[in-house]
Image: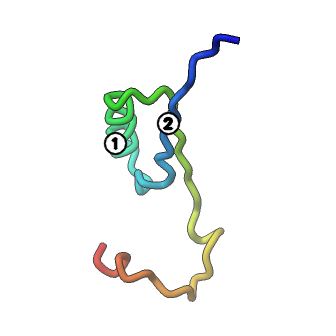
Amino acid sequence: MNSKVLIIAEAGVNHNGSLDLAKRLVDEAATAGVDIIKFQTFKADKLVSKTARQAEYQHRN
């Protein structure tokens, strides 16, 4: 079997919900030779309690 190996980049939620940032991540991944890029999204109110404490880095943003 002579199949091409595919390089998959995991962008995850690093786009912070910004379509423009997601597009930049795609461009950078393509420049790096990535074949596929994976993204994730979530709705915080469905995932985390409203009373959950914020991480230190979240206080700066």
Q: Mark 1 points at which residue?
A: 20
Q: In this view, does 7 lie to the left or right of 20?
A: right
x and y percentages locating residue 16 in the rendered image: 41, 57
Q: Could you say where residue 12 lies in the image, as x and y percent from the top left?
A: 51, 51
Q: Position of residue 38 (x, y in %)?
A: 54, 41
For residue 12, side relative to residue 29 (left or right): right
State the residue in front, 14 or 32.
32
Residue sitting farthest toward the right? 1
* Residue drawn at 63 percent across, 15 percent down: 3
- Specify the label residue 37 is tagged with: 2
The quadrant in which residue 2 appears is top right
In space, the residues marked 2 and 1 are separated at their CA atoms by: 15 Å
Circle 1 SS class: helix
**Helix, strand or loop status at disc 2:** strand
In the picture as drawn, the residue positioned furthest to the top comes out as: 2
The residue type indicated by label 1 comes to Asp
* Image height of 54 relative to 29, above or below: below
Between marks 2 and 1 in the image, the one whose residue lies nearer the viewer: 2
Tell whether 30 sits left or right of 10.
Answer: left
At label 2, which amino acid type do we have? Ile
Instruction: Locate the C terminus and report the quarter of the image it occupies.
Output: bottom left
